[in-house]
Image: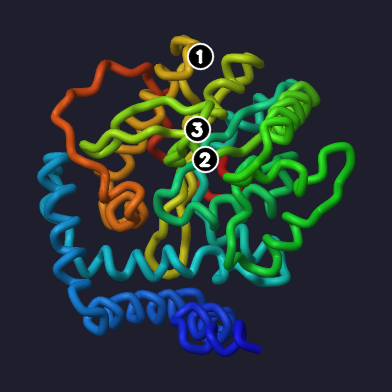
Amino acid sequence: MKHIARRLFTWKFYFYEALLPTLATLPPPRADAVVRAAGRASAFLRPGRRARLKAAMDRVDALLKRDGGPASWRSLAESASRFAARDYPLDVASDPRALDRFDVRGFQDVQKILGRGQGAILVGSHLGAHIAGMHWLFRRGLPVRAMVQRPKHVSRELSRRFDSDASPFPQAEFFLKRDLAPADAVERMMRARAALREGLAVYLNGDIVWDGPNTRTCRLLGREHRFLAVWAELACLTGAPIVLVFCRHLAGGRFGIDFKPLDPAASARPERLLAAYLAEVEAQVALDPAEAVAYLTWPCYADAPEIAVPHSAPPRVAPVAPRTRRVKGAVST
């Protein structure tokens, strides 16, 4: 009872238990407008919020020397609310209805890899609508396992997929935890390797700030962090192709998901792979800094000291065709 009483005095209870389930019954553009309005209201109601958001946007605009002009703190406030809503707007019964809200680019590269019976390492991030992107992967029917910390406050549909006990690689056996015993960590690594050898895709986030083994130090948006580099070590161990995955919010309650294969000629060293990935993350942030809610507001990113060390030249990321045609959750070019 005490736990329930405490929840009643948090914004998360009203946001996740009352507002978002109600919005799922509205048309996507109207529901998205309500979520964005909640973000703007939060910026006015929380003391010091507007100043922090404005400072964050000013910093990233100056750091990236954006040609598109300064972004608004109001956009960041709206994106923060969308970011918190995670994949709740996609919690509908029909797979086609959910998939039809995505504009997809580059998925044919993943299809070619898996079509050859080869496993693929999909590297996501905390940029934009990252949980919605994971939702798309599972709804699309991709043979994928997510090797991440199990996210909280996700839709019932995604939670159901997470609970799948599909043999021989149940999803529950892939989730990471910060307090995993060394033997359990090794077991998960070997399980991921086996899944790749069986032709599955394994999804990991490449931007997790981490203390302990299996990390590499690299720079992101002018700050140095230690990142969990399991995905890069797994790539070097297996030789599996790497495809970067970015998902962002679009107007009218839609989403855009891009698949960008890492250049096969890239150096097979974890630190070089991490540098290539983070360089592409920064390029994505430059397209729309308001989508970088985590990088600009989470203490693990924003409180690190700034550095003035330039990037070394990273391996290239293969370009994505600029024009696509949307087809019910997939794309043909």
C-alpha span from label 3 to label 1? 29 Å
Amino acid at pointer 2: Asn
Q: Earlier in the sequence, mark 3 or mark 2?
A: 2
Q: Is mark 3 on a helix, strand or loop?
A: loop
Q: In this view, does 9 lie above or below 324?
A: below
Mark 2, other Cα within 10 Å: few <14 / some 14–19 / many ≥20: many
- Residue 225 is tagged as none
Q: In this view, does 161 lie above or below 209?
A: below
Q: Which of marks 1 and 2 is nearer the N terminus?
A: 2
Amino acid at pointer 3: Gly
Amino acid at pointer 1: Pro
Closer to the observer: label 3 or label 1? Answer: 3
Which residue is labeled 2 in the image?
A: 205
- In the drawing, does residue 70 fall left or right of residue 264? left
Q: Is mark 2 on a helix, strand or loop?
A: strand
Q: Where is residue 97 in the image (x, y as percent from the top left)?
A: 64, 66
